[in-house]
Image (tube, rainbow, N blue to C red):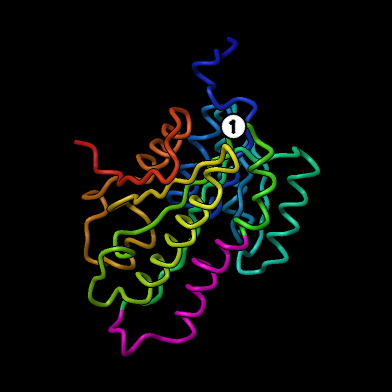
């Protein structure tokens, strides 16, 4: 049976999802592919990416895996060039990849872990925006969604390192959104997934019952939904647990 435009509203669109090997990134990739988008999957672990790609293909979707380390700016540049050569545009950029340092008092933050988090959560974000800006502007409706955390705007004890990186992450995205809103049709959104059943959540709350928080599929479906429905520039929202 041929699927209709209503069933595949993102047909013909190309999406890049970072952190797509597991958790919210993987769920988002599956949800976008189910709505017709061709999804470029990025993360470091090839085997995990291949598993997500298999899921997408089993559902009748299409995807391409692009294993890379986002902390390597040259890798991001090469990926942008590859996407430009194959599709000449990028319709959607969903930034899910993030690193959370060990929760600790500010005075005891491990410098190496903090540097790694800042590199992935902040510097890599700037590199993604820089290298994919032209491709997003070539699309009819270039869209960027960045996943944040409430600690980026609401500081919490022991979360200082991660919160600081997410505050900087949000600042970059909002600044970029304001810079491009009058010169292009691009739009930027910042989404807080809220409490979600991920490996990062399990590390932060080791005693929590995983079934007490929503699965990543809820967030992935919401991301796909707002990309289908579209959103105003600098849109912000928090994904609440379904009742």
> Residue at horizontal 33%, vertical 61%?
201
> Residue at horizontal 39%, vertical 43%?
235
**Eyeballing the image, is 198 above or below 228?**
below
> Residue at horizontal 51%, vertical 67%?
122
How crowded pointer 1 is (Cα within 10 Å; few <14, some 14-19, many 20+) is rated as many
> Residue 214, located in which quarter of the rendered image?
top left
For the record, the magenta segment spans 104-127
Q: Main secondary structure of the magenta part?
A: helix
Foreground residue among 116 and 182:
182
Q: Position of residue 129 (x, y in %)?
A: 60, 56
Q: Position of residue 163 (x, y in %)?
A: 35, 69
**Eyeballing the image, is 6 above or below 117?**
above
Foreground residue among 57 and 24:
24
Q: Label 1 belongs to which residue? A: 37
Q: Position of residue 94 (x, y in %)?
A: 52, 47
Give left or right: position of 102 versus 133: left
Q: Is residue 115 magenta?
A: yes
Quarter of the image containing the N terminus?
top right
**Eyeballing the image, is 14 above or below 162?**
above
- Quick check: can you spot residue 205? yes
Give left or right: position of 210 versus 109: left
> Residue at horizontal 28%, vertical 84%?
105
Q: Is residue 215 magenta?
A: no
Q: Where is residue 126 in the image (x, y as percent from the top left)?
A: 57, 62
């Amino acid at each position: 049976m041929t699927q209709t435009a209503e069933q595949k509203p993102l047909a013909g669109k190309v999406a890049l999802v970072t952190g797509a090997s597991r958790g919210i990134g993987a769920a988002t990739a599956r949800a976008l592919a189910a709505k017709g988008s061709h999804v470029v999957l990025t993360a470091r672990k090839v085997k995990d990416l291949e598993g997500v790609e298999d899921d997408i293909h089993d559902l009748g979707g299409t995807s391409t895996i692009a294993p890379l380390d986002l902390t390597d700016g040259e890798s991001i540049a090469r990926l942008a060039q590859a996407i430009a050569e194959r599709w000449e545009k990028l319709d959607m950029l969903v930034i899910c990849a993030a690193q959370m340092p060990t929760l600790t008092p500010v005075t005891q933050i491990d410098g190496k872990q903090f540097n790694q988090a800042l590199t992935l959560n902040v510097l890599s974000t700037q590199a993604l925006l820089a290298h994919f800006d032209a491709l997003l502007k070539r699309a009819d409706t270039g869209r960027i969604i960045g996943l944040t955390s409430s600690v980026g705007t609401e500081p919490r004890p022991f979360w200082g390192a991660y919160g600081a990186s997410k505050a900087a992450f949000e600042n970059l995205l909002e600044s970029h959104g304001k810079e491009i809103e009058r010169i292009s049709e691009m739009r930027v959104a910042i989404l807080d997934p809220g409490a979600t059943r991920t490996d990062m959540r399990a590390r932060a709350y080791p005693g929590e019952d995983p079934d007490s928080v929503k699965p990543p599929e809820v967030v992935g479906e919401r991301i796909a939904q707002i990309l289908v429905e579209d959103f105003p520039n600098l849109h912000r929202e928090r994904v609440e647990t379904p009742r």
